[in-house]
Amino acid sequence: MLLGTFNSSLWNDGGGLQKGEVDVLDISTRGWARVLPAGDPGTSGKPTFPSPRAGATALSWPQALVGSNRAQSSDVIVFGGEDESGNYLADVWVLRAYNPSANSNGALQGGVNASGAGVSIQKLSTCATAVAQPTASGSSSSASSGSSSTSAPGPSDTNSPKPPSNAAQSLFDTSVTHKALAPVSIALLLPAILAFRLSSPSALSPVTPDHRMALFYLSVLTSLVAFGVGVGGLASAFTLAAFGDPRPSHAARKLSDMSWLERRRGLNSVGDLDYALAQFPRRIDMPPTPGTAAMDIPSTRGLVGPPSLTPRMPDSLEFLIHVLLHAFLLGLCILSLVALWLRAPKGAFAAFFAWVVIFYALIIYLASRGAPQESVLSTVINRISTDHTPVPATPTPSRPLSDIGVDSVPFPTSGPYAHHQPPFRIAHESEYPTSTNGHGSAEAEEDDGLDEDTRQRAIEEEMNRRDVSIVTVPKRKLFLTNPELS
């Protein structure tokens, strides 16, 4: 392995790259050796080395590619590459390794016919070390960078910089865009889930279908925005913070970027609709005219109210989906909190933590109110908070009908039906058929003297007074579809 580039402000290689360092892997010991080759003396006699470069093309051959004595050496040709400033290079270098032992006696030879005379090899005994970064107190390391080092450090070198002891400096840093978009996507997903739960049927105050559809569309739109922001944050995670953010470019506005709620500016075309929409809530809130409401009209018929929505457990598949979704959401929140605590300002961590606490507090509050109806949490809270003590039934007293022909006892208020209480008066003791001492009254004694026709006529008059309708339904004929064969 040869040439290459590195950040001299973060690492110190002892000046090996400036002297054409070559790293050799010993396959028998599985260890690397840092070797400084002899340079090219050229015409001036001063050894020169190839400059640091990246992306160069190399070709290795077991024999020398050029020269007179090709069997005693092997060549590696290196061409081109890009230097640290971004300039492309066009020079060609040959790294020649000699099969016999190199002879350091004599003058160093150069060119394609070099025989290995005057070649001296220097080995580095230490690896490249990290440069200590400035601490919080303002002190910095005195280690020299790779460009100012001219000699290789030996094993006894005690002034070489040590790796930093702070583990936080070794963390992989990402761009600010990823740090911001990743938690923002989760923060947008939380209100989307709340809106979806509110759009489901629940035991809360009655919500119109239009409001439910609006909450459902708001939940879907917010979820799509959160998904897009999350994808952008995930894509920006592969961009280092040192590279900087790309400049935004102007682009045409798409149809999906426009709000579907935007309307035309013409007042004549939408004036009537706006007036109708503005008057619609007022009509709902306006009290009815006295005497025309349903409860103001005397009636003995029961008025059916809205059915009570009791929380119930979802089926097995929905139960599994709900549990996995909330477990995944809780895991994302915990992962984001840990990342914000380690890499972001503490203010961002506190804001996101408060947002998560508010979200789960609202989830528990809505579940206690029965929203949504099919929810595990709503069902559990409802079963815990509901009193299951049976209420004893109240016996119905026996008494005659009043003079106006309506029932004098108010209808029960418990149950799925709402009843209207008709007007009534308290009956006198003389109207009861029996007295308190058990003897029959005068009216009962008079009924004993009536004949059968008079009593039947009295019963018919009483039935007419009660407004009782008798409906006779004919019996259905029974047909045998599969008679047995005799």
Image (spheres, grey):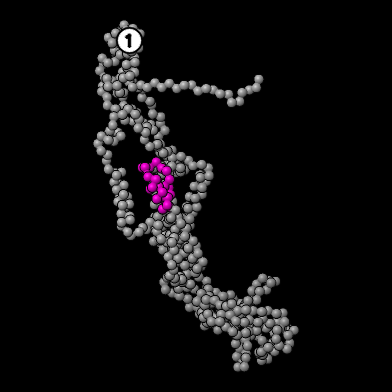
Residue 126 in sight in this render: yes
Q: Which x, y percent locates residue 152?
A: 58, 81
- The answer to whether 411 is drawn above or below residue 429 in the figure is below
Q: Residue furthest bottom?
A: 44
Which quarter of the figure has residue 73? Answer: bottom right
Q: Which x, y percent locates residue 20?
A: 60, 82
- The answer to whether 460 is drawn above or below residue 45 in the figure is above
Q: Which residue is mark 1?
A: 454
Quarter of the image that includes the C terminus: top right
Q: Is residue 130 magenta?
A: no
What is the magenta range?
A: 194-219
Q: Nearer the viewer, residue 175 or 164?
A: 175
Q: Name the kind of residue labelled 1 in the image.
A: Thr
Residue, x 32% and y 20% (percent of image)? 466
Q: Which x, y percent locates residue 175?
A: 47, 67
Q: Is residue 196 magenta?
A: yes
